[in-house]
Each structure stands twice: as structure tokens, then as C-alpha cells.
Image (cartoon, rainbow, N blue to C red):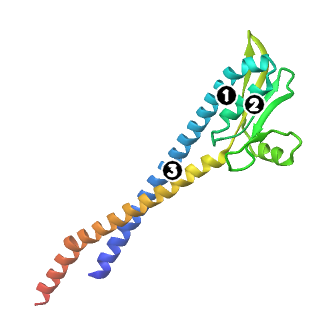
Amino acid sequence: MKTVSTQILGSLLLTMLVVVGGGGYVELQDSAKVEQEINLRNQRNTLERLSDSLVYPVWNLNRAEVNKAISNELVNEDIRAILLYDEHAELYSGMIHEGTADSFKLYDPNNPLHQQLLSSNQHPVSLNLVKDAVGIGKVVLYANDDALRARIRQRVIMLAHKMLWLFAALSFVQFLVLRKVVVQPLTRLATWASS
């Protein structure tokens, strides 16, 4: 009797593990996609805000105001750097996060660390600055994927905990039901037949 119940319980648990694991994988992929879409939308919103707030400081060549507007946007942990190019595609100003701290520095194109940090970002997003239908520059935003990866890793851990608890609860319920419905009646039948 015990081997039959063990085999049935094992096959049910394996089936549950496959179903719960597959569902968890699909949920994780959807979560990662949603996080990436939110991140991209936030980058676009930041660029639009910057393009609006930088037009007059760039037009008036007010570098202090430009740096202030850029630093206000760099408080977002999802942004690695913001660079501003003038109408001749030359670097006018920029700021970069060098590490995970909340501090940021003026971008130096000759700094190897700055070059390395920006080269790791494969898909910067940019938006042109326009005043009176004339292009006066371009803002380029480099994302910091570390925060996105940390959020996805946190979701993986939460999902794994959720799946383990669900698997444990279903295993326990299946064990009790299998024992009550299959093992005990078969044991009584075997006892009755042997007497």
C-alpha cells in the first residue's frame, strides 16, 4: 500500500512542480517585460521634461542652470548619465553616476571610468532640443540597468518563495487526501480480506 501511495503522491507532486514552475516562469517573464517598459517610459518622460526645461538655459548659454536641471533629473536611480550636446554635436555639459551612491559628477569624456560606464549601455535614448523650430542641441540619457536588475532579482526571490509555499501546501493537502481516500480504504479492504 505504501509504495502505491508513494508512487501516486510522487507523480502528483512532479506534475504540480512542472505546472507551478511553468506558471512561475511565465509570470517572471511578464514581470521583467513590464519593468523594462516602465523603465523605458520613465526615461522618455525624463527626456521630455529635460528638453522643456533646458531650452532657455541652452539658448542663453547658462551652463549653471543647465547643470542644475540635469542634476535634478539624476536623482533617479535608473539613470546612469545625462549628456547635452550643442547644435554642432559637441558636448556642452553632462553629469554621470560613477557608482551606486547618490552622488554624481560632471561628465569628463577623457575619464576612462566614464567611458567604460557609458560603453556598457547599448541603447541610450535621446531627444533634440528645439527653439522656434531650430535645433539647438540634443539631450542623451544613459540608463542604469543595475536598479532594474535588482528589482527583477527581488521579484524572482518573491516568486520562488511563493512557489515553495504553494508547493508545500499542495503537497500536504495531497498527502492527507491520498491517505484518506486511497490508503486507508485499501488498508481496511486488505485487513477485511485477510480475516
Q: Is residue 99 left or right of residue 109?
A: left
Q: What secondary structure is marked by label 2? A: helix
- The kind of residue on which mark 3 rests is Leu
Q: What secondary structure is marked by label 3? A: helix
Pick the front one: 117 or 163: 117
Rounded to the nearest angstrom, the CA distance separating label 2 from label 1 is: 15 Å
Which labelled disc corresponds to residue 67? 2
Pick the front one: 29 or 80: 80
Residue occupying image coordinates x 75% and y 47%: 98
- The kind of residue on which mark 2 rests is Asn
Q: Quadrant of residue 16?
A: bottom left
Residue 87, percent across and down? 83, 20
Residue occupying image coordinates x 38% and y 63%: 165
- The kind of residue on which mark 1 rests is Leu
What residue occupies the far right of the structure in this picture? 110
Q: Quadrant of the N terminus?
A: bottom left
According to the picture, the residue beneath numbered tag 1 turns out to be: 47
What residue occupies the far top of the structure in this picture? 132
Going from N to C along the chain, the mark reached first, 3 or 2, is: 3
Q: Is residue 129 left or right of residue 87?
A: left
According to the picture, the residue beneath numbered tag 3 turns out to be: 28
Residue 38, percent across and down? 56, 37
Residue 141, percent across and down? 71, 34
Rounded to the nearest angstrom, the CA distance separating label 3 from label 2 is: 39 Å
